[in-house]
Amino acid sequence: MLMLWTGALVLIICIAHWVYYWRNPRCNGKVPPGSMGFPLLGETLQFFTPNTTSDIPPFVKERMKSILLVLRFFLTCSLLLDCRYGPIFKTSLVALPVIVSADPNLNHFVFLQEGLLFQSWYPDMFTEIFGRQNVGWLHGFMYKYLKNMVLHLFGPENLKKMLPAVEETACRRLQRWSNQETVELKEATAGMIFDLTAKKLISYDQDNASQNLRENFVAFIQGLISFPLDIPGTAYHKCLEGRKNAMKMLKNLLNQRRAMPGKSRSDFFDYVLEELGKEGTILTEAIALDLMFVLLFASFETTSLALTLAVKFLSDDPSVLKKLRAEHDAVLRNRENADSGLTWKEYKSMTYTFQFINETVRLANIVPGIFRKALREIQFKGYTIPGGWAVMVCPPAVHLNPAKYQDPLTFNPSRWEGGEINGASKNFMAFGGGMRFCVGTDFTKVQMAVFLHCLVTKYRWEPIKGGNMLRTPGLQFPDGFHVRLMEKNRME
């Protein structure tokens, strides 16, 4: 009996010791303040708690601000403690220690030191979802090689050639939607962009395909940012199944191409096959398929969310719609032939449109966190970031910072007048930053600008239902955004 009690006591001491060091991790210096939450679980549940705010995510905001805790002392006294963590704090997500940064200077430092002090990194749950050979997890020469491959598709010269196809697709879809009683904008724009991108990437035509490729991506997206519980019926499990099925279809398409080597389609798949066939190539089939998967996903999901929110902002603010419409009407008036297609020069002249797009993505905050891993112990502002720890850069905290943006929750495209509207900065990282600045940024802006041009010059619309936003922590429209689309009269 004594040995049993002794063993139980030793176990309790070991558990207490483990819990203590879980909550108070060792390092050579001072780790940023914060809570590690419960052992293993950490603060994962709080991080994934849905919210409807357009402000800084509650998980981050509550840990940045001053909180007064009342501790009762001997049931008679109260002691007020300032438990402010500030813009840099520690936490634990999915059993991993994380430094969360809402500090523009630390964010800039992290991006600047990519490949030296930090490297791109995401939790294992994302690795399972996107694949272990994914471009986001590759580093050094291999990453640069894949980045150049993507630029072959989304570089300025190719985008100039793609402009007519983007305009034709947008006009055709808008015409189709105007013949419907209502259209759910998020789903409709996602389908439009996916079909366009899939055609350019792999010559995929849904109307003539035996399987629906996009259905697998929809299942994938619905569980993308969800609690990582891989049990049948959960969103995460459906996400993994969607990826598996999509990858199987891409693999089959690759095999079909190889079986017909002489038939060229002049798409990105042809370019990939050419690279795979080169002697001494560093490209593998697994990396190529993962790259295709990510390009298909990234090109339509984030852009359709941004477009849906853009139309919602236009619906809510007639003054902004008036200014945007005036710019695009001027494009038509200045043409010799009003019915000719958009030119690259006209696209580049859309100054207010680019301000509008920047303001839309600033408030959209589609990406709630950008992850990096510290390659060694790092000192910053008196804090120590232990080697091997993750750092989560928090774009919403930067984009909604009242010290940089006056009335940060107000939609105001004119705030970008006279400022830099391209690239990234300490205070704007909607498309990432540093050497991993999104290579598809220009493609996204082309699609948004062209769609808006076709919409505001040829149509008017009225919201019917939906439009409410939910963050889990990624942006969603749980009830969609349903609008009635009507062609404008020539005199309007």
Image (spheres, helix red, strand yellow):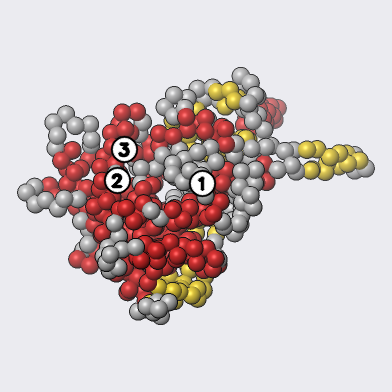
In the image: residue 379, left or right of residue 325: right
Say which residue appears at 54% left-offset and 68% top-offset.
318
How far apart marks 2 and 1 lie (CA) works out to 24 Å
Q: Are marks 3 and 1 in contact (CB under 8 Å)?
A: no
The N terminus lies in quadrant: top right
Image: 88 above or below 411: above
Instruction: Give the label on residue 156, or none.
Output: 2
The Cα atoms of the two marked residues, 3 and 2, are separated by 14 Å
Q: Residue at the location (14% across, 34% down)?
A: 278
CA neighbours of label 3 inside 10 A, class few (<14), some (14 to 19), many (20+): some
**Is 13 on the left or on the right of 377, as rendered?**
right
Residue 101's disc number: none
Q: Earlier in the sequence, mark 3 or mark 1?
A: 3
What amino acid is at disc 1?
A: Gly
Task: Mark 2: give few (<14), some (14-19) or many (20+) Cα within 10 Å.
Answer: some
x, y percentage for residue 347? 35, 55
| Residue at image mark 1 | 418
Query: Of marks 3 and 2, which one's residue comes earlier in the chain?
Result: 3
Say if 159 sits above or below 136 in the image: below
Residue 290 in picture, x, y percent from top left: 30, 44
Image height of 418 relative to 436, above or below: below
Can I make out residue 58 in this image? no
Q: Which residue is mark 3?
A: 147
